Image (spheres, rainbow, N blue to C red):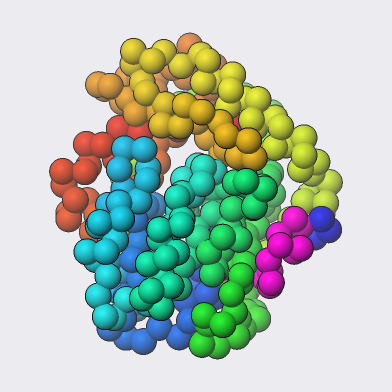
Amino acid sequence: MKDFPYKNKSSEVYFFSYGRLALYAALKAMAIKPGENVLLPAYICNSVLSPFNALDIKVKYYLIDEKLNANIASIKQQIDDRTRAILVVNYFGFPQKLDEIKMICRERKLVCIEDNAHGFLSAESGQLLGTRGDIGILSFRKTISVPNGAALLINDATKLAEKIKPFIYKKTIDDEIRFFLRAVKIMFGKLAVPSQKIYREDPPEEENNFHKYMKQISFLTAKLYDKAELGRLARQKRERYSQLLKNIDRERAKPIFSDLPDGVVPMSLCVWVNGDREKYIRDTCVELGTRTYPWPSLPLDVQDKFADQMMLYKNLVCFPV
Ligand SMILES: Cc1ncc(COP(=O)(O)O)c(C=O)c1O
């Protein structure tokens, strides 16, 4: 892939089909032992859990507030002497505040994993997100139209016990087929219609179906990537974000990030909805002529342990930009 901007900034870049596979490779290279754990934000999609489950690594959750900032007190509370790493998420392409978390990692000798699956091309003060932690995860398939595509950034190899091993995964064309079907749906305007069942409680398999995703990066990904005009794509996303921000009815929904700092390339505009989320989705899809989606499908464990956070977590709606 030419002009992959992270190649200059980061010490090592490894390509994968999915972000969860990149995370799996990183966890393997960290050689985490049974009984050790990694901290994850409680506001997380259940697919992130799948590599942990596949490797039988324990996870512990810390809280996230309504601005999607990590709660530092909760992180400190969750760390124990078997913790090996803290994973932080740049939600929807917006930078998570990392300074304090990196300091905790330094003091406690933990690996800081910057999950930047949502923020391909996004930067803070000129530094690309994903390059700020010891390890970075990208899932550029969410930003560029490709059948699949993700990367693992090793920014500090000294934190790994073993080298990243090349993986030989099976070759399938499932993702290419899905990609073409989606293109056809877009052509016929089908994706503009909100789906019938708006809040999808993903079956728990999503947390355990990791092996389904162990496949090679698509042969089409590099070709499509090389054709994409990254600068234009980033500008378009910023423009669409600003436009949507202007059109959101603030009485009914509150944008989480109501500013768009320089360098940020957003994946979606997200709002907290006052009242009935499903009605809001139905109405705004029609009013704004856009698709929306709820995020995330929370892990079942989070749904059980953080019952009081659920009202907040379940009231978010995303508009892709
Ligand atoms: C925050 C976050 N990290 C990682 C992933 C995993 O990326 P992928 O779907 O490419 O495996 C996702 C997927 O949605 C995600 O939302």
Q: Position of residue 294 (x, y in %)?
A: 39, 36
- For image coordinates 48% across by 65% down, the residue present is 113
Quadrant (top left/top right/bottom left/bottom right) for the C terminus: top right
Say left or right for 9 vs 88.
right
Asked if one can make out residue 38 in the rendered structure from this viewpoint, the answer is: yes
Locate residue 173: give its quadrant. bottom right
Tell me which residue sits at (80%, 60%) in the image.
1
Nearer the observer, 101 or 245: 101
Please identify the quarter of the rendering in which residue 35 is found: bottom left
197 relative to 115, above or below:
above
Residue at screen point 25% across, 75% down:
80
Is residue 13 rendered magenta in the image?
yes
Above or below 53: residue 292: above
Compared across the picture, whether 320 is left or right of 42 comes to right
Q: Nearer the viewer, residue 124 or 34?
A: 124
> Can you give x and y, in whole percent of width and height, for residue 156 in the image?
59, 75
Q: Is residue 207 magenta?
A: no
| Segment tinted magenta in the rendering | 4-14
User: x, y percentage for residue 174?
Assistant: 62, 57
- Where is 39 relative to 148, above or below? below
| Position in image of residue 199 (x %, y %) | 33, 36
* Picture mark count: 0
Q: Residue at x 46, y 55 (%)?
A: 98
